[in-house]
Image: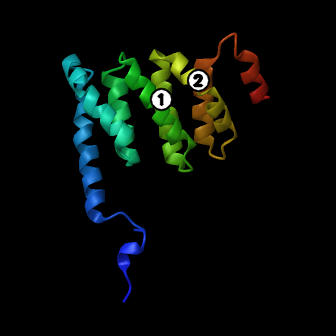
Amino acid sequence: MYDSTSYKELKPSPRKQKAEKIAVFSQLPFGALTPLEPRLGKKLIEPLTNLIHSTSAMSLLYECINTVIAGIPNHNASIQLCVQKLRILIEDSDQNLKYLGLLAMSKILKTHPKSVQSHKDLILQCLDDKDESIRLRALNLLYGMVSKKNLMEIVKKLM
């Protein structure tokens, strides 16, 4: 007899996948409502940050980050956490996650440019990506990040 408990699960269980989908879909209305109702954002800070810290589901992570960006843009600690987690998305080998990470970074750039500029090295690396949409998204982000201090570095990378 073989002991199947010693083997690593190759595919997530259908129950876990269903639970993750339910969590993502239940998160969507909050993302739409937080910009309209400021008090809702304040009430969601703690549960959102807990989810951002703990979830391994990238789709749920992305939706939580979008909710923070849209509804709680002035909560600096949450934005910093989002930027850290977005770095993980951008470093992922999945091109879709990388694109979504860059897209969310560009939203944060509007309100917290210094937070995004601290990840300039990673964004510069995306200019060498094989996917044209990733390169264009990174270029768009760099356009918003250019300053007198970093102009020469960015121009050298582009040449």
Where's residue 132, x and y in %? 63, 42
Which amino acid type is marked by label 2? Ser
Where's residue 92, x and y in %? 54, 46
Q: For the N terminus, give its image quadrant.
A: bottom left
**Front-most of 13 and 109?**
13
Q: For the C terminus, give its image quadrant.
A: top right
Does the residue at mark 1 contact the one at mark 2 (Cβ under 8 Å)? yes
Residue topped by disc 2: 118
Which amino acid type is marked by label 1? Val
Judge whether 116 appears above or below 12 on screen.
Answer: above
Tell me the quarter of the picture where residue 77 sits.
top left
**Front-most of 138 and 86?**
86
| Kind of element beneath mark 2 | loop
Where's residue 146, x and y in %? 64, 17
Tell me the quarter of the picture where residue 66 sits.
top left
The Cα–Cα distance between marks 1 and 2, rounded to whole angstroms, is 10 Å
Q: Can see residue 146? A: yes
Judge whether 151 appears above or below 96 on screen.
Answer: above
Q: Can see residue 63? A: no
Closer to the N terminus: mark 1 or mark 2? 1
| Kind of element beneath mark 1 | helix
Number of residues whose C-alpha sits closer than 10 Å to that of mark 1, classed few (under 14), some (14–19) or many (20 or more): many
**Front-most of 103 and 50?**
50
- Please, which colouring scheme is shown? rainbow
**Residue 83 marker:** 1
* Residue occupying the point 59% across, 28% down: 119
Where's residue 40, x and y in %? 20, 23
